[in-house]
Amino acid sequence: VQLQASGGGSVQPGGSLQLSCAASGSIEGTVAMGWYRQAPGKQREPVAFITTSGATNYADSLRERFTISRDNGKRTVTLQMNSLKLDDTARYFCVAGNTIASVHKGSWGQGTLVTVSS
């Protein structure tokens, strides 16, 4: 599975960004898709995930501001990020796997950079 993320960029605090990730290659291993992020000097952390059936899982601190969705036909997953904060600055990685619990063991994209600054 190959994953191509897009939509990163720079935004001011309080702004919004939408990230997209397109999967190609084998359909196997894309039941669960989602996002991790890694801020400078910090460990990679889970953001949000979604399955082909629409089940979602969010980091508790992000669920009120971030929304994940997917188009199974197009094999894409989208992360809508609202009310962005300085702490949201990170490289966001698209991931895909067989389950949400094991998605970190699946396929990873190269990431897209999100910078929140005033």
Image: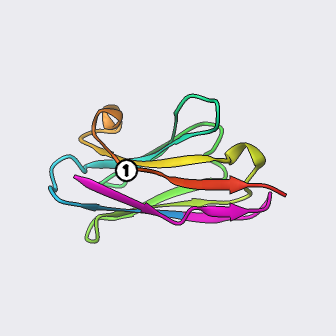
Residue 13, image x and y in percent?
80, 57
Return the x and y of residue 16 as percentages of the image width and height. 68, 64
Question: Where is residue 106 drawn, in percent x and y?
Answer: 27, 39
The residue tagged 1 is 109
Say left or right for 6 vs 30.
right
87 relative to 26, above or below: above
Q: Position of residue 60 (x, y in %)?
A: 61, 36
Q: Residue at x 75, y 64 (%)?
A: 15
Residue drawn at the location 34% of the way across and 32% of the way down: 101
- Count the numbered circles shown: 1
Q: Which residues are magenta?
A: 1-18
39 lies above or below 94: above
Q: Decide: is 107 above or below 45.
A: below
Whether residue 51 is in magenta: the answer is no
Q: Secondary structure at mark 1?
A: loop
Residue 67 found in image quarter: bottom right
Q: Residues within 10 Å of mark 1 (few under 14, many from 20)?
A: some
Q: Residue furthest right?
A: 118
Is 76 left, or right, of 80 in this rendering? left
Q: Quadrant of residue 38?
A: top right
Q: Residue at x 30, y 54 (%)?
A: 53
Q: Is residue 2 magenta?
A: yes
Q: Of the residues shown, which amino acid type is indicated by label 1? A: Gly
